[in-house]
Amino acid sequence: MSGPVLVLHTGGTIGMARSPDGYRPMPGFGAVLRRQLAGVSGLPAFDLVELPQPIDSANLQPAQWTTIAAELVARWDDYRGFVVLHGTDTMAWTASALSFMLRGADRPVILTGAQVPLVEPRSDALTNLQTALLLAGSLRCGEVGIFFGRRLLRGNRSTKSSSIAFDAFSSPNAPALAEVGIEVGIDAGQLLPAGARDFARPVFDPRAVAVLTVHPGLSARQVDALTDDPALRGLVLCSYGAGNLPDAEPGLIDALARAVARGVVVVNRTQCAHGPVVQGAYATGAALARIGVVPAADMTLESAFAKLHVLLATHADPARVRTLFATALCGEMS
């Protein structure tokens, strides 16, 4: 596999500059970036494409996952790897979604960005981008990853864990794919091999999936109010510990059972950063299994949400979605 690397700039802090109202997307970012990289030796050749309308990371919508994927797929055979510049707030959500939309990828897609804009003092932008370029140009794998700070992480195992540190992302239930210091230490045994392309370009309904965090005082009426929305087809339930709900709350399990009976795919993910859901460990978790709630194993919230969105956008049968959700598709669960 030869050729240059494609850098796709979708928006985010890396391409912003100061304004009277705070940071805003800067005009001419591409030219500034090229000047900054011009004197750096050893980087692969690259082309830069910028989305016409930069995405404010906090305003990301599922439909924009399809926009990003379409830009990559349209140029797939012309490049040996891809770097996606993205805002940090929703980078792990996009990386997760792309991993399910680009299943069977035969070259790497590395998302990166910055905590401090490129044009600001002490910016982490150039270090992140230079290493992402080197990884995208050298790896022979089918990973959608996040490189940030010092580590390359599998995208669908990542979460933003700090708003202030340069090592802003972590992978609570999976090892890093590479640790970068003076040397680049790649854990080749963890990399997903290149596969047969099974790319999807879903049409997303932003109301199709919701997230419900279990908390003291959660009532059946609140569950009914959320799941009565006719557009809702999937629910990520963020439960306690190993997958538990407060069974002393009258009607809570029944409210979830009504949603499942209406065809809503309910998946159960622990609120804990480390460890999986084990629905049979306690009686409350076993009750969820009986009504058809699907355990999310040790997936991140971002990954569970994106996987459910992609599956619901590509499959009409809730039973088929439940089966596929419980199946590891691209390294998203142990």
Image: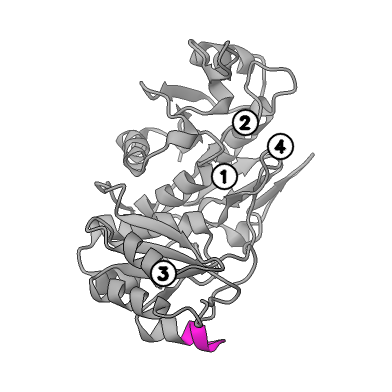
Asked whether 169 or 83 is in front, the reply is 169
Check disc 3 and report its element: helix, strand or loop.
strand
* Residue type, numbered disc 4: Ile
* Residue type, numbered disc 1: Ile
Q: Are marks 3 and 4 in contact (CB under 8 Å)?
A: no
Q: Are marks 4 and 1 in contact (CB under 8 Å)?
A: no
Asked whether 179 or 189 is in front, the reply is 179
Q: Are marks 3 and 1 in contact (CB under 8 Å)?
A: no
Colour mode of the rendering: one colour
Place residue 253 in its image quadrant: bottom left
Image quarter hosting the C terminus = bottom right
N-terminal label among 2 and 1: 2
The residue that disc 1 covers is 146
Residue at left 37%, top 50%? Answer: 102
Give me the C-alpha separation between circle 3 and circle 2: 32 Å
* Residue type, numbered disc 3: Val
Residue 166: x, y in percent? 71, 37
Would you say residue 39 sits in the magenta stretch?
no
* Residue type, numbered disc 2: Ala
The residue that disc 3 covers is 267
N-terminal label among 4 and 2: 2
Front disc: 3 or 1: 3
The residue that disc 4 covers is 164
Front disc: 4 or 1: 4
Give me the C-alpha separation between circle 4 and circle 2: 11 Å
**Residue 114: which numbered mark, if any?**
2
